[in-house]
Image: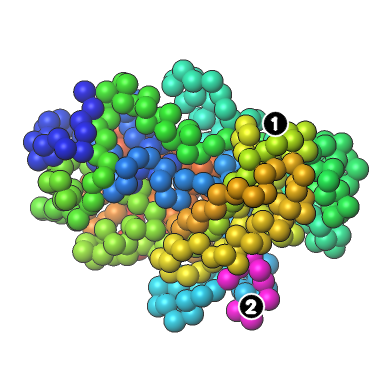
Amino acid sequence: MVLNTKSNLSGGTGHKRSIVIVGAGVAGVMTAYAFAKRGFEVSLIDALSGPAQMCSHANAGILAVGHAKAWAGPGALNSIVKATLGLDRSIIVRQYLDPSLWRWGAEFLRNCTLQAHAANTAKLQKLSRYNCELISAAECDMGVPSDIRREGGLYLFQDEEQFRRYTASILDHGGEASEILDRDQLISREPGLKAMSHLLAGGIFSAADAVGDCKLFCERMTSYLRRQGSVRFYFNTDVLGLNTSANSVVSVRTNQGNIPCTTVILATGVETGRVTSALGFIPNIYPVKGYSGTWKIIEQEMVPKLPYVDETELLAVASYGSRLRVTAVAEFAGYDRTISVKQTARLSRYVTRAFGKAVDLDNAAFWSGLRPTTPSGPPFLGKALACDNLWLNAGHGQLGWTMALACGELLSQKIAGEIPKLAGVSSTAPWIEPI
């Protein structure tokens, strides 16, 4: 039986294989699924009323294998200069005096070499491709209709020179299983782009990409795990700290009582440092705010079926059934979650220009979320050295949906004593034993 948030949390079962996962975003829910498959007793805790209520709530939903590349790289330096001068609409810095941003930025710059960029991108590629292998099996396990469309994804360019440089880079690296399309080929592949064809220089088709509603997937996974009875869900439950003894976490302290455990996994995104600071370490994860807008589709044939990233304007666009979603902006504003009218207006202008006749422009729903971003790109995935039984699965940036199931699976393999399918895919730090 699944216990509700009013259950007696201090009782516990004493089971030797009990896992407590903190955080019910896509990373936490997928991790719970991976452990439940292996027969562990799992407890999943979240402060909010259900799964995927924060950064996983209204993201683009693109399983973006073609975009699984480290942000830190030689090309990022130019973006940083432009952002500092206020010349880049896609990157906005609002907290110049934030010490945590300076700490994050210093490490980010150290990862901007060609060698570091290649190594970090390789990690992201491994995780995202493994994730794609696992998603279909998870849908079969749940016994639900597949809402994830696997027809690939597009990367569009409005600037001829940018398109030329990007395609040259792809050709130099062996093509990356991508297909280069000129404007006419692009519209032929995706007729839903016809209304904005005059803006386009060309694009890239990535056959590995897919698209699906991340929040819906998390909700279905939660319902499935409830039916299976292998996971206890503690929603509306605040984590106050970790109770330790002899270099181990013995229970998770919450506002509802203590939850005993043999192993704790933090899938806590940007809140991770607030949990670990009492243990003497703070993972270098910065909250990079992004925005999304969702519009009702009224003319399906005028909206792209393939998801895409506009590489010139740095927006992501996807459709789910009767909804069109557009996401954009990397805003360095600390933990501020307010929705900027200026940024939502930018989303509205783009949709009006590209799909104004296809959607209901008057009833958009806007959202902002804090992407938990590491300086190097890959998440922190491994055991904290401060405690024998404390593990982290945090810092997925904009690729949480693209990597979450793979990360949960690798952690469960490691803790269950199996040989992990992948190795060397975590960000590294002095306080972690990385996978």
Q: Residue at x 62, y 32 (%)?
A: 321
**At label 2, which amino acid type do we have?**
Gly
Q: Is residue 99 left or right of residue 136?
A: left
- Where residue 151 is drawn, which disc sits there? 1
**At label 1, which amino acid type do we have?**
Glu
The chief SS type of the magenta part is loop
Task: Tell whether position 134 is magenta.
Answer: no
Residue at label 2? 86
| Location of residue 125 in the rendering, given as x and y in whole percent from the top left corner | 58, 45
Question: Is 28 located above or below residue 2 in the figure?
Answer: below
Looking at the rendered structure, the number of numbered marks drawn on it comes to 2
Q: Residue at x 47, y 70 (%)?
A: 333
Q: Residue at x 42, y 50 (%)?
A: 54
Q: Is residue 172 visible?
A: no
Question: Is 343 located above or below residue 136 in the figure?
Answer: below
| Location of residue 421 in the rendering, given as x and y in whole percent from the top left corner | 46, 35
In which quarter of the view is residue 282 placed?
Answer: bottom left
Element under label 1?
Answer: loop
Badge 1: residue crowd in 10 Å (few <14, some 14–19, many ≥20): some
Q: Earlier in the sequence, mark 2 or mark 1?
A: 2
Element under label 2?
Answer: loop
Q: Residue at x 54, y 65 (%)?
A: 340
> Is 138 in front, or is 93?
93
| Location of residue 127 in the rendering, given as x and y in whole percent from the top left corner | 52, 42
Question: Is 345 located above or below residue 156 in the figure?
Answer: below
> Is 357 in front, or is 335?
357
Badge 2: residue crowd in 10 Å (few <14, some 14–19, many ≥20): few
Task: Tell whether position 90 is magenta.
Answer: yes
Q: Which residues are magenta?
A: 84-92
Tag 2 near tag 1, CB within 8 Å: no
> Is 71 in front, or is 423?
71
